Amino acid sequence: MTIKKSIFTGALSLALCASTLFAGGADVGQAQSVEKKYIVVFKQDDKLPAGYEDLLIKAGGQVESKLEKLGAIEVSSSNPNFLKEVKKSSIVSEAGEENKLYPETPAVEATISYDDAAAVQADLYEQQWDIKQVTNNGESWTLPGGTGKPVSGDDIVIGIIDTGIDYNHPDLKENYAYGKSFVPNYPDPRDDNGHGTHVAGSIAAKGRTMGVGPDLKVASYRVFGPSGSASTAHIAEALMTAADDNVDVVNMSLGGYDWLQDPDYATKDVVADVRMFNRAIQYAIKKGVTVVGSAGNNAVDISSPGKLSGSDKGATHRSPSNQNMIRVSAGGQLKNLAYYSNYGVGKIDVMAPGGDLGPNYNPVTGVGRDNSYLCLATVPGGYGFKAGTSMAAPKVAALAGVIIAQHGKDQLKPSQVKHIILKSSDDVFKPGYDEKSGHGLINAVNALK
C-alpha cells in the first residue's frame, strides 16, 4: 500500500485525535467557470504592494480577505486562467488554490457529564496521569510561577487556535480571558465540538480536573465552525491576531496539522498556502509569541516530503515546518511513543503525554484496548477522554506559559522559552536527540528549577 492510500484509509485512520488532511487542487471534472478561492502571496512580506488591486481586477479576481501584515490576500475568481495570469506579475511571489483543513472526528473518546462526574468521583484529577507526569504529581505547582500565576505583572495568556472554548465550563471559566471567532457567520468563540475545550483544560483547568498551569489564562481563537473545515487564510489571520493581542503562547493542536498534498497535483500548487502560513508563524514569533504545534497522528516519518509520499508521485508536505516553533510528538503513560504519533529527525522538538490505549493494544486488530491510558480533560458539558498529538501539544504550551510566568511577561524571547523546554526535557529513548521524542519528554519541575 502506498503512503497516500495508507494515510487516507486503512490502519492509520485509527489515529486517535482529529488527524487532519488537506484537499488540494481542483475536483476532477469540475466546470472551468466555477468560482474558486486562491491565496496570492506577494514578494513584500509585511505589506500589500502598490498595484495589486489592478492586477487582481485584470485577472478576474475579487479580494475576499486581506492579510496585509503578511503580504498576502485571499481571492475568489471564476476565471480558469486566474493563476496563470497572476503569476506573470513581478510583484507576486506565489499563488495557488486555497486549501481547507478538515479535522476528523476522534476515533477514540468517552465523555462524562457533570452529574456523572459528581457521582463517580468529585476529584477527577486522580485520573489525570498525564498532568501528573508533566508536573511530577503537582511538585511544579509549588515552584515560583509553577501554576502559571506570574511572579509579577500581567496574566500569562495562552491563545488556542482551535474549535473554540466552552467558556462556561466550571473548570475553565475562572481562567477564560476572552475569545474571537474567525468562522464566517459565527461570531461566538464558544466550542460546540469538544476539541478546543479539551485542549484548554489540559492547559489551565482548575476544578475537578487540572491543567499543567491552573492559573494560566486561555483565549479562544475559533477557526473551526459547524462545517468542520477552516481555510488557511482564516487560520493565518487568527495567528496574526493573537500576536497583535500580545498573547504569550499560541497552541495549534489542529488535528496534528497534517498538510497532505494530493500527489495528483504539482508541488507548486500548495506553495502559496505553506508560504503564507510560515509568514504568519514568523510574524507571531517576531512579536514575542512562543508557537507550539502538534506533530500529527498518522504514525509516519515526516522528516521529508519524499519519505511521506513513498511510491506516490509528487510530494507530501508537513506544515507548519518553521524551525523556530516547538513541534510535539505524543507519548503514552509508560513514556513510550504513542502508536499513532508521527515522528522524524529534525521535525520533532519534544514529546509530551498524549495518551494511547495501553501496552496490550493492537492497532491493527483493535484487541487489548484500555481506556485508562487516554487523557482526561474538559469538554462542553462535562469531561472527556481523548488521545492524540492534539492532546500532547497543549501540555508544552502550558509549560511555556509557566516558564514565562516565572520570569515575567515579555521578559523572555520565544527562542529562550524553547531552549529551556528542550534542555530540561528527560531522555526517554536513546541519549540526546532522537526522531521519536526529539530532545526528550517534557518536565515542568526541571524547567522551573
Image (cartoon, helix red, strand yellow):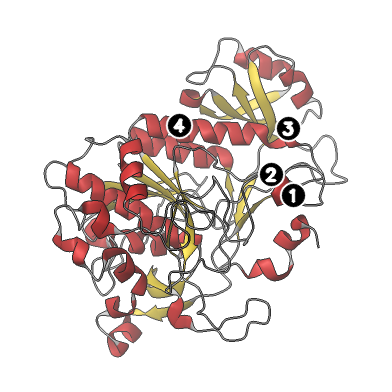
435 sits to left or right of 177: right
The residue indicated by pointer 3 is 268
Report how far apart the C-alphas of labels 4 and 2 lie in the structure: 22 Å
Specify the amino acid type for callout 4: Gln
Q: Nearer the viewer, mark 1 or mark 3?
A: 1
Q: Mark 4 or mark 3, which has the lower sequence index?
A: 3
Q: Mark 1 or mark 3, which has the lower sequence index?
A: 3
Q: Position of residue 386 (x, y in %)?
A: 47, 71
CB contact under 8 Å: marks 1 and 2: yes
Other residues around mark 4 within 10 Å, as few (<14) / some (14–19) / many (≥20): many
Q: Mark 4 or mark 1, which has the lower sequence index?
A: 4
Which residue corresponds to the image point at 74% horizontal and 49% vertical from the top-left? Answer: 309
Q: Position of residue 246 (x, y in %)?
A: 30, 36
Q: Which mark is residue 282?
A: 4
Specify the amino acid type for callout 1: Ser
**Is disc 2 placed on a helix, strand or loop?**
helix
Report how far apart the C-alphas of labels 4 and 3 lie in the structure: 21 Å
Report how far apart the C-alphas of labels 1 and 2 lie in the structure: 6 Å
The residue indicated by pointer 2 is 305
Q: Nearer the viewer, mark 4 or mark 2?
A: 2
**Is disc 1 placed on a helix, strand or loop?**
helix
Specify the amino acid type for callout 2: Pro
The residue indicated by pointer 1 is 309
> In which quadrant is the N terminus drawn?
bottom right
Q: Nearer the viewer, mark 3 or mark 2?
A: 2
Q: Mark 4 or mark 2, which has the lower sequence index?
A: 4
Q: Position of residue 211 (x, y in %)?
A: 29, 64
**Dividing the picture into quarters, in which one does residue 283 lie?**
top left
Residue 249 in sight in this render: yes
Report how far apart the C-alphas of labels 4 and 1 lie in the structure: 27 Å
**Is disc 3 placed on a helix, strand or loop?**
helix
